[in-house]
Amino acid sequence: MLVLVLNAGSSSLKYSVRRFDPAQPFTGGVRIAKGIVEQIGAGEVADHLQAFDIVSGELAEVLGGRTVDAVGHRVVHGGERFTGPALIDNEIIRAIEQLNELAPLHNPPGVQCLRAATRAWPKVAQVAVFDTSFHRTLPEPVWRYALPDELYRRYGIRRYGFHGTSVDYVGRRAADLLGVPWEKFDGVIAHLGNGASVTAVNHGRSVDTSMGFTPLEGLVMGTRSGDVDPGVLVFLLRKGYDAEELDSLLNRDSGFKALAGHNDMRVITEAAAAGNEEAELALETAAHRLARYIGGYHVACTGAQAVVLTGGIGENSAPFRARLLAKLGPLGISLDAAANEDATGAEEGLRISTPDSAIPVLVIPTDEERAIAEATLALVGTP
Ligand code: AMP
C-alpha cells in the first residue's frame, strides 16, 4: 500500500510517500519519495494551490502510473471537535475551514491542500491528522484561562496545545525504551524546533502543555516570543501598534531572532562560544524558561519517569541540551557528556543523563510524517 503525506506549513508544502506491507501496517513502512516546495507566497510559487500542482506533477513522475491508496494531511488546528484523525468528506473540510480564524497562519494552507487533493484524487481515501487532538485530554482547570466565560463561549478562547502528533509519537517510543506500557507512562516531552513546546503526559495522556490558544504561548522559539505579560500588548496598543503589527512582532520578530539576531541554533551556539554576549543571553533565556516548565511539568505529570527531548534543536544541538541539563540538578538530573555528544543525529533514542540520575533524559528523533502515515492507515484500514 502507498500512503502519501502532505504537510502544508505557512510558507511550505512537504510531501512524502511511504510503502507499507499490509500484513505489518504499523512498522512505519519504507519511505520511497519525499520533496518540498518552499517560499510559497514569497518566490515564484504564488500560493498553496500552485504548490500542490507542482507536488502532484512530481508525484506522477515518481509513481509512474501507480496511484496512492490513501492520503494523510497534517492540519494544525482541530479545535474542540477533533479528538483524533478524521476521514475527509465535504462536511469535515467545512468544519476544518471554520477553524481557520483560530489559526490564520497555519490552517488555511492545509485546507487549500485538502480541497485540491480531494479534487485531484476523488476516489482516494484521505485523512486529516491534527496537531491539537492529542491535547484534547487536557483537564478543564488546565485548558481554562482565567478570563470571563463569555470569551470561551463566543470565540473559543481556551488553551488547545499543538505538536501533539510529535509528542504522541516520541512519547510512545520513550515508553517502549523504558519498558513501560504507554497507558502507564508519565513524563515530560519537549519538542524543540523552530516552534517549541513542552507537554506533561500522565498515563499516556496530555495533562498540560505550554502552547495555548495559538502556537505562540510558552517557550522562547525561533521567531516567536512565547510567554509575555499580556499587559505588554495593551501597552503597545496604546502606543499605536495595530493588530497586524502585534501579530508580526510576536510571531516573526521575537524569540531567538530578537534576542540573538538569528533563529538558527547552530549559528547562535557558535556565536555564544565565540564570546557573543547577546547569543549567550538568548540561550540562557531560552534554557531558563524551558527548565522552569520542565520543573513544573514534573509536578503536573505526577512525577516524570523520563524527560524526552526532540525536534531540530532537541535532536541536534548538544550544546543546548548540555545547557538545559545543567539547570535540572534540583530534579536529580545530571548530564552524561559523552552520551550527549553521541545522541546527536542518532536514529534511535539515547539517554543523555548519567545512569544515577533520578529521572532519565532521553533524546528521541521525531517523525511526524511517519506518524501521520500510520494514523492514516489505521483509519483507512488495510485490504
Ligand atoms: P525543526 O523546526 O524541528 O525542523 O527545527 C529547526 C531548528 O532546529 C533550526 O532552526 C535549528 O535551530 C535547529 N537545528 C537543526 N539542525 C541543527 C544542528 N545540527 N545543530 C543545532 N541546531 C539545529
Image: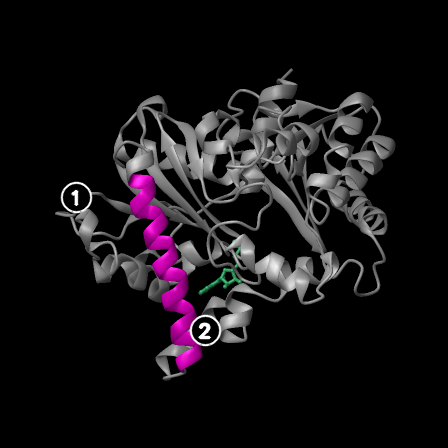
The label shown at residue 286 is none
Q: Secondary structure at mark 1?
A: loop
Query: Where 302 sits versus 379, above or below?
Result: below
Q: Secondary structure at mark 2?
A: helix
Residue 55 placement (x, y as % from top left): 78, 48
Quarter containing the C terminus: top right
Residue 363 in view (yes/no): no
Residue 129 placement (x, y as % from top left): 63, 32
Residue extent of the magenta highlight: 277-298
The label shown at residue 358 is 1
Residue extending farthest front? 238
Within-10-Å neighbours for mark 1: few <14, some 14–19, many 20+: some
Query: Where 211 sits versus 92, above or below?
Result: below
**Residue at the location (57% across, 65% down)?**
254
**Residue at the location (33% across, 35% down)?**
300
Residue extending farthest left? 356
From the image, tell me which residue sits under label 2: 268
Residue 105 placement (x, y as % from top left): 71, 49
Q: Is mark 2 within 8 Å of ligand 1?
A: yes
Scheme of colours in the image: one colour
Kind of residue at disc 1 = Ala
Q: Is residue 362 left or right of residue 198?
A: left
Q: Is residue 213 magenta?
A: no
Q: How many marks?
A: 2
116 or 102, which lies in front? 102
Quarter containing the N terminus: top right
Q: Is disc 1 in contact with disc 2, using a CB cutoff of under 8 Å? A: no
Q: Is residue 237 left or right of residue 364?
A: right
**Residue at the location (49% across, 72% down)?**
259
Q: Which quadrant of the view contains residue 297?
A: top left
Question: Which label's residue is closer to the chain start, 1 or 2?
Answer: 2
39 or 67, which lies in front? 39
